[in-house]
Image (cartoon, rainbow, N blue to C red):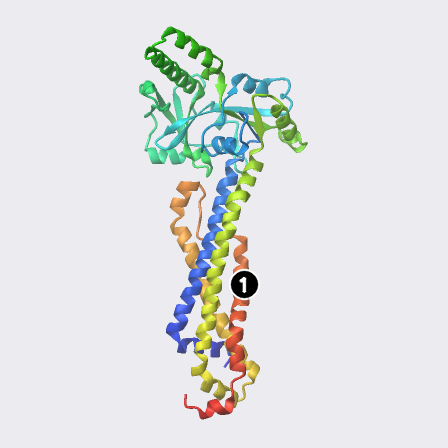
């Protein structure tokens, strides 16, 4: 009989204790798998957001806030930049040789929890996402430049709001003065797995008209309630005159010609913009990488460390389980020795038993971890846009099985030494 069969028989004789030990190991491994897979999902979701364009140009301020607002539609805009700067970047002589396209965006309020973004039709015709994939429409079409009150919905926004083609998006400015303003839904984008899925896009012309009208109405209302009347109204006009919403945008997404980008012109264009007084240019991929490693990356190592501690505790449980059984197994070990087994052979049987328990727990843990992630895949896809399947593995999982073998060998060493030192004569005389 092989040593593996002897170890397996020993596990079967203590079925309940062995089962509990295997379950403990499986839960620890499942936790490790879940942390690794979820980290991979978050990594994909984060980095996909900044793909498709080379630079973001926005108002002076925090780089991270500009990226969070423009890429992920979180936080509030840093400020606005003049529309003339967009025209200069897109068509001006200073940037013309480097800039392939520039897409303006205006960040508005939220509609049922989804950010409203004013932009131009070229957003979905000239920009790409992920691996140079083009935007597709699941239903309808892109909005037209000469139709200022048309809207396009991201896949997640359409699913959650239940809006259909032909229905209206109302009150996007979030104020009482815009209740009558509405945008007709003309298209619903196919899922992209990027933040684009979680926004409502409207024609920038209509967006600016509504916001400019809302601002004017609020200023007039304040003037009517002010005792100074005309004097204060003039002061407010002077205060806000240089910030006409129709002449400003929140940011622009800039694509550099590939050959120029390869030649290092992206950083050159960024420096030219940064030298101005009104705007800054950031490389979104770099900012996202810094934010991810600075926040999510550290958190991943903390969670992974906790999961590894759980696995080690399960390994210690294997050691305690086998060691506590040694007093009941001395007669069995003595019989093996009397039948010709060497001390080393007995020691190897105990080590193999520890390894078998760890490998069974590891196999069940792998299946359990991936099974739970797969069961939650619809929610993950809805929240992040990343589709997770049952067989989605991370490279670090390849270390799990060898790691479990090493751990099992380490924790099995103490009971194996106890078996090695078993006194044959005393154990044979002692009644089992």
Q: How packed is label 1: few (under 14 Cα within 10 Å), some, or many (20 or more)?
A: few
Number of marks drawn:
1
- Name the foreground residue: 150 vs 174: 174
| Residue topped by disc 1 | 403
Q: Secondary structure at mark 1?
A: helix
Q: Could you tell whether 287 is left or right of 180 in the image?
A: right
Residue 23 at x, y = what percent? 40, 65
Residue 109 at x, y = what percent? 39, 27
- Please identify the residue farthest to the top as the structure is shown: 230
Q: Is residue 410 above or below residue 243?
A: below
- Name the foreground residue: 258 vs 339: 339
**Residue 48: in sight, yes or no?**
yes
Please give the name of the residue rendered at 54% of the width and 70% of the height, measured from the top-left corner: 410
Residue 239 at x, y = what percent? 46, 13
- Please identify the residue farthest to the right as the structure is shown: 263
Q: Quadrant of residue 73?
A: top left
- Name the foreground residue: 288 vs 102: 288
Q: Is residue 396 above or below residue 23?
A: above
Q: Quadrant of residue 57?
A: top right
Q: Is residue 210 above or below residue 116?
A: above
**Residue 148: in sight, yes or no?**
no
Residue 198 at x, y = what percent? 41, 34
The quadrant the C terminus occupies is: bottom left
């Amino acid at each position: 009989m092989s040593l593996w069969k002897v170890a397996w028989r020993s596990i079967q004789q203590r079925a309940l204790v062995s089962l509990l030990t295997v379950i403990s190991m499986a839960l620890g491994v499942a936790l490790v798998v879940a942390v690794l897979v979820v980290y991979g999902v978050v990594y994909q979701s984060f980095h996909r957001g900044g793909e498709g364009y080379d630079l973001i140009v926005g108002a002076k301020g925090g780089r991270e806030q500009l990226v969070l607002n423009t890429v992920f539609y979180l936080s509030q805009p840093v400020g606005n930049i003049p529309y003339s700067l967009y025209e200069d970047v897109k068509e001006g002589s200073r940037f013309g040789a480097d800039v392939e396209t520039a897409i303006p965006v205006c960040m508005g309020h939220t509609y049922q929890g989804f950010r409203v973004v004013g932009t131009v039709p070229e957003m979905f015709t000239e920009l790409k996402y992920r691996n140079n994939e083009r935007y597709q429409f699941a239903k309808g079409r892109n909005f037209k430049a000469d139709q200022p009150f048309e809207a396009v919905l991201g896949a997640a926004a359409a699913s959650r709001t239940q809006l259909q083609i032909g229905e209206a998006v109302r009150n996007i400015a979030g104020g009482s003065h815009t209740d009558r303003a509405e945008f007709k839904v003309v298209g619903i984008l196919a899922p992209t797995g990027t933040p684009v899925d979680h926004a409502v896009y409207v024609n920038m012309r209509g967006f600016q008209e509504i916001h400019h009208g809302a601002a004017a109405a609020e200023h007039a209302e304040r003037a009517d309630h002010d005792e100074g009347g005309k004097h204060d109204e003039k002061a407010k006009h002077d205060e806000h005159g240089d910030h006409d919403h129709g002449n400003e945008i929140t940011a622009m997404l800039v694509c550099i010609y590939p050959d120029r980008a390869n030649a290092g012109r992206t950083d050159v264009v960024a420096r030219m913009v940064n030298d101005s007084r009104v705007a800054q240019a950031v490389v979104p991929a770099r900012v996202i990488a810094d934010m991810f490693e600075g926040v999510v990356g550290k958190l991943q190592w903390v969670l992974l460390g906790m999961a590894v501690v759980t696995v080690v505790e399960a390994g210690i449980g294997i050691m305690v389980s086998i060691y506590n059984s040694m007093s009941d197994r001395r007669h069995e070990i003595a019989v093996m020795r009397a039948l010709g087994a060497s001390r080393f052979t007995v020691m190897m049987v105990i080590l193999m038993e520890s390894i078998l328990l760890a490998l069974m727990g590891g196999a069940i843990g792998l299946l359990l971890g991936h099974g739970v992630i797969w069961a939650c895949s619809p929610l993950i896809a809805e929240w992040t846009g990343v589709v997770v399947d049952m067989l989605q593995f991370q490279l670090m999982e390849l270390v799990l099985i060898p790691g479990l073998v090493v751990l099992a060998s380490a924790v099995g060493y103490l009971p194996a030494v106890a078996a090695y030192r078993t006194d044959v004569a005393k154990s044979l005389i002692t009644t089992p």
